[in-house]
């Protein structure tokens, strides 16, 4: 144990354009969780007695019946029914085994995101000019019913399609707005315990994308993960970008120092041999699940431990499923992960 040298942490999210989707801390070498979190505001999900009925919105446009979607597999633009499209998104972005309330939350974010894209790119998104949205993770994942059936075990359709349909149909027309405008509802797989402020991951501070607690992610398969790398490979990867750094297997412990942590507990910056390097850059370099990471050196081997999966902004999908299992409904889930939003109907 003595020659286990724990030396650094850092993390954070790479620019998943929209997600598929992060939270939690370890006891980093820098100190126990309590210390890292000492100044973090607590905002556990709030359970409300009775949600207000969905208000019909007059501030946002009504949704169209048909939409154009660029299919990244066929390179063709499909014209499909708006609500039908959403079923193919929900089934692609979340396991159908998830709690129905979590699927409903995903249905509302899918609808909101689609409308956001339509309004932002009425003449087509620059990377697929004939349609405002595509079927890849560049926008939000969509899979046809035939492909969903082919991609799942026999019996999946019979067992789960009704549930997917219910998630969309029971939230028909419902979207998320902030101050009367359609929001960009970013989401991710697993925050690791707390989501991120948008400006810590992307460029700007968005008022509804604030760091909040995400306490129910215990079932998430990538809540904790680890991989091992030879110390020489580790050093050469860093030197492939920062060739002038004076780092060796024997001095890493002293040369890698934590820079700044985000409010969400992820690594914004590391200082390696006096060079500031962003957590996102480290995440990309080592292909890590998130920017919540730590390094443990044992001889010539380095173990990289990560917490959470994805960029960490907006709704945590595993956190949403965990909240649903705790009894929260989809509106409570959405209002927890998206700060000060309203759920309105555009149908
Ligand atoms: Zn796209």
Image (cartoon, grey):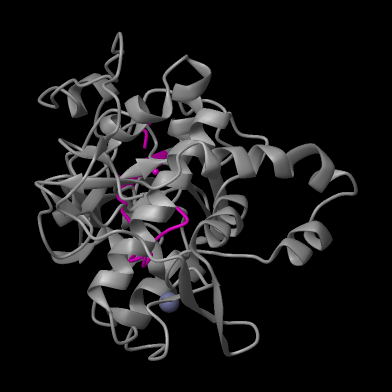
Above or below, 330 relative to 195: above
Residue placed farthest to the top in the image?
49
Residue 116 visible in rendering: yes
Magenta stretch: give its range: 5-26
Q: Is residue 46 left or right of residue 87?
A: left
Residue 61 picture location, percent across and down: 24, 60
Q: Residue at x 53, y 64 (%)?
A: 141
Residue 264 visible in rendering: no
- How many tags in the picture? 0
Above or below, 285 relative to 205: below
Residue 181 picture location, percent across and down: 15, 54
Q: Is residue 67 left or right of residue 45?
A: right
Foreground residue among 181 and 262: 181
Q: Any magenta on residue 338?
A: no
Q: Residue at x 39, y 43 (%)?
A: 22
Quarter assignment of residue 280: bottom left
Q: Is residue 163 left or right of residue 123?
A: right
Above or below, 21 relative to 244: above
Q: Residue at x 36, y 67 (%)?
A: 17
Q: Any magenta on residue 6?
A: yes
Q: Residue at x 52, y 72 (%)?
A: 136
Residue 247 picture location, percent across and down: 30, 67
Foreground residue among 27 and 23: 23
Predominant SS along the magenta part: loop
Q: Is residue 319 left or right of residue 76?
A: left
Residue 23 picture location, percent across and down: 36, 37
Residue placed farthest to the right in the image?
154
| Location of ligand 1 given as a quarter of the image | bottom left
Above or below, 119 relative to 302: below
């Amino acid at each position: 144990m003595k020659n286990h040298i724990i030396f650094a942490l850092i993390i954070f999210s790479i620019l998943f354009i929209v997600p598929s989707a992060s939270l939690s801390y370890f006891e980093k070498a820098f100190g126990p969780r309590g210390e890292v979190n000492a100044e973090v505001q607590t905002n556990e999900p709030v359970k409300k007695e009775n949600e207000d009925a969905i208000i019909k919105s007059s501030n946002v446009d009504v949704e169209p019946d048909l939409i154009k979607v660029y299919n990244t597999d066929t390179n063709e633009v499909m014209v499909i029914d708006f609500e039908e499209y959403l079923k193919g998104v929900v089934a692609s972005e979340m396991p159908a085994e998830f709690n129905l309330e979590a699927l409903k939350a995903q249905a509302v974010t899918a609808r909101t995101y689609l409308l956001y894209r339509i309004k932002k790119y009425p003449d087509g998104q620059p990377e697929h000019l004939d349609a405002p949205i595509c079927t890849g993770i560049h926008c939000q994942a969509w899979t046809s019913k035939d492909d969903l059936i082919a991609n799942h075990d026999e019996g999946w359709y019979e067992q789960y399609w009704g549930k997917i349909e219910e998630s969309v149909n029971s939230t028909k027309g419902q979207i998320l707005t902030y101050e009367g405008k359609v929001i960009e509802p970013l989401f991710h797989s697993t925050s690791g315990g707390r989501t991120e402020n948008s400006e810590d991951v992307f460029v700007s501070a968005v008022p509804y994308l604030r760091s909040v607690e995400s306490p129910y992610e215990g079932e998430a398969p990538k809540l904790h993960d680890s991989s091992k790398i030879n110390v020489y490979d580790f050093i050469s990867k860093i030197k492939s970008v920062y060739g002038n750094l004076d780092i060796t297997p024997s001095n890493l412990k002293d040369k890698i120092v934590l820079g700044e942590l985000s409010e969400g507990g992820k690594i914004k910056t590391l200082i390696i041999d006096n060079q500031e390097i962003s957590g996102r850059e480290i995440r990309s370099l080592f292909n890590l699940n998130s920017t919540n990471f730590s390094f443990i050196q044992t001889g010539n081997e380095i173990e990289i431990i990560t917490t959470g999966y994805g960029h960490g902004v907006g709704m945590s999908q595993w956190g949403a499923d965990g909240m649903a299992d705790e009894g929260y409904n989809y509106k409570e889930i959405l209002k927890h992960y998206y700060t000060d939003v309203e759920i309105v109907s555009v149908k």
